[in-house]
Image: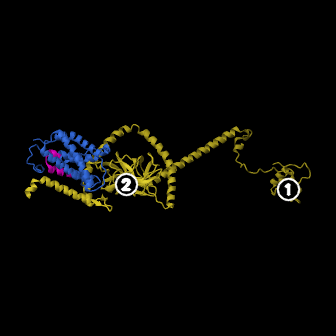
Amino acid sequence: MESFIVRYRNLVVLLVVLVAQIVGLAVQVRRTNNGQSTLDPVDQKGVRLIRLWANAVISPPEQLIHSTKLGVVNLWTNYFALWSVRQQNQDLQKTIDRLRLEQASLLEDAKQGQRLQTMLGFEQKYIYTTIPAQVYGSAGSDRSHVFYIDKGSSDGLKPDMAVITADGIVGKVRDVFSHTAQVLEINDATSGAGVILESTRIRGILRGDALGRLAIVSIMADQRIQPGERVLTAGGDMVFPRGLAVGVVEKVVRDPDRDGFINVILKPAAHLDRLDEVMVITSTEPRFSTQQQQDLATSESEKGSEAAAIKDQAIKDQMKASEMMGEKLPGLTDPNLPADKQPLNDSTPPNSVPQPPQPLHPDRFSPSAATVTEVKPKETTKDDTETKPRTKSPSATAVAHPRNGAAQPEAAKPKTPAAPRRNP
Amino acid sequence: MSWFGNDSRRDVEVHRYPLLIYVLLPLAALVLQAWLPRIIGPYIWFDLPLVVTIYFALGRRNPMQGTLLGMAMGLFEDALSHRAIGINGLAKTIAGFLAGSVGIRIEVDNQTIRLLLGFALSWLSSAIYLFVNRFLLGLPMEWNWLTELFRAVGNTLIVLVLFPLLDRMQVRD
């Protein structure tokens, strides 16, 4: 027996190694209720330990190479970028100022939308906290679309957190180690996400394929779906918040397995093949972040100061225009009066009633007498009733009578036609 | 059957290397295999761990060493992916064993033979990967033979460049 093992030791070693690995594989695979095999969604303890060891061995040199590459690239690009950075900074500052004002109005709309959603009992998740992370490595095979980032559980990462870039969604955190994490890309065949077409509002499930393409699979054929339409996250998969960019429709193909269904091939919004930096959404909250609140306050204050400046300028322009108008209108200036007595500078309220001059010889028709003697008409005609002023004001009496002779009460009629007319 | 385990018939030179090469070269292959796809994008038409496995198995002319090295490289690759651990391990174990076994029988310093072996073992590795994944485990998997052809060609080109460079690191008596 011993001689057999020695003689065929290479073959024996091969068989032992193969059997050990096959047993290890059998432990990892489960059979589902519908008879299909699948991998455990969560690694077992032993499997996770192997991944941890492999990551501990490969990650440090990989990160070293990656940081060296980044250092060289940064050194090179920053040298040339500094030539125009001042001008860019000024341009960007102007853009920021403009965007802040725009953001203020948009945030107001969003706030209103949130209030309405709250009233309707619908809680919408918004991105609250993100952690930036560097991509430093991958699985090294196109059969497994995963990559590694330099943030882990010590930074607050957990499995199933969404990973995005400014362009769109990238994937989700799959395995988390202490200082690194493995991210499953959305174009992997085992990945999935709920998506919605922006204009047609058709919902579907996003999948990857062996070639690393993105597709919304098995949706009912619909003529409205056209290339170029944007696709967003639907928010129902408990991973990605709603409304993030996924990609655009590239083409529509028939589902080879099901008649009447189609697959929509997408062009991803994020550059999945050339990722350097990503953001991990660590929490979503139905409210604005502190930073957004600060931005809102800043933009509001800027908007307020700008409005006040505009108002001051308008008042100055108005005053200047009235001065020019006053100079051009001769009736408003009296050359015989000093400057402070000019009508334009008269501070008397314009609507005040002027007092009539006192008569030299007051009689019962004079205004002062009318205040003492109450005028009581003996008889009034119908016309008189309709037109007679019912006021006892002296000025009203004095002014109204001469202008409306028919309305004069008999007791107040002058005896002579040459009765003096009081003209204030 | 005798060539499966009898290394008493080895009458050709066994390549020897400094200890550091045995450690650093596989490690560098694994690190570069994981890092380069971030640089060159989706066209990962090479398998550096497989190439290194073939090189050491051929040069050492030892099926057992080829088996163990192939297993280690494959398991590392599997561990870095999100798939089951052992699929690449099985493929590279068999590839390493065959390369070591062939190294006993034929002259492997010939560049043409190296190229042919590199191409053939690359195909074999892909075929074993597909067999284990789809038929042994029953896992759903899409497959594109054209990609595997490109990968085999890529590995062959790397063999063409890398093997002569690594030969210079041999320890010669």
Q: Amino acid at mark 2?
A: Gly
Please state if A351 lies on the left or on the right of A142 as rendered. Answer: right
Residue A361: % across, % down: 87, 51
Residue B15 x/y as whole percent = 13, 44
Residue A49: assigned label: none
What residue span does the magenta drawing correspond to? B56-71
Asked if the magenta segment contains residue B13, the reply would be no
Label 2 sits on a secondary structure element that is: loop
Kindly identify which numbered label has been placed on residue A383.
1
Nearer to the camera, A362 or B55: B55
Which amino acid lies under the numbered mark 1 shown in the image of this protein? Answer: Asp
Q: Mark 2 to mark 1: distance in Å?
A: 92 Å
Q: Residue at x 19, y 43 (%)?
A: B117
Residue closer to the observer: B50 or A125: B50
Q: Mostly what secondary structure, the magenta segment?
A: helix
Question: Pointer 2: what residue?
Answer: A192
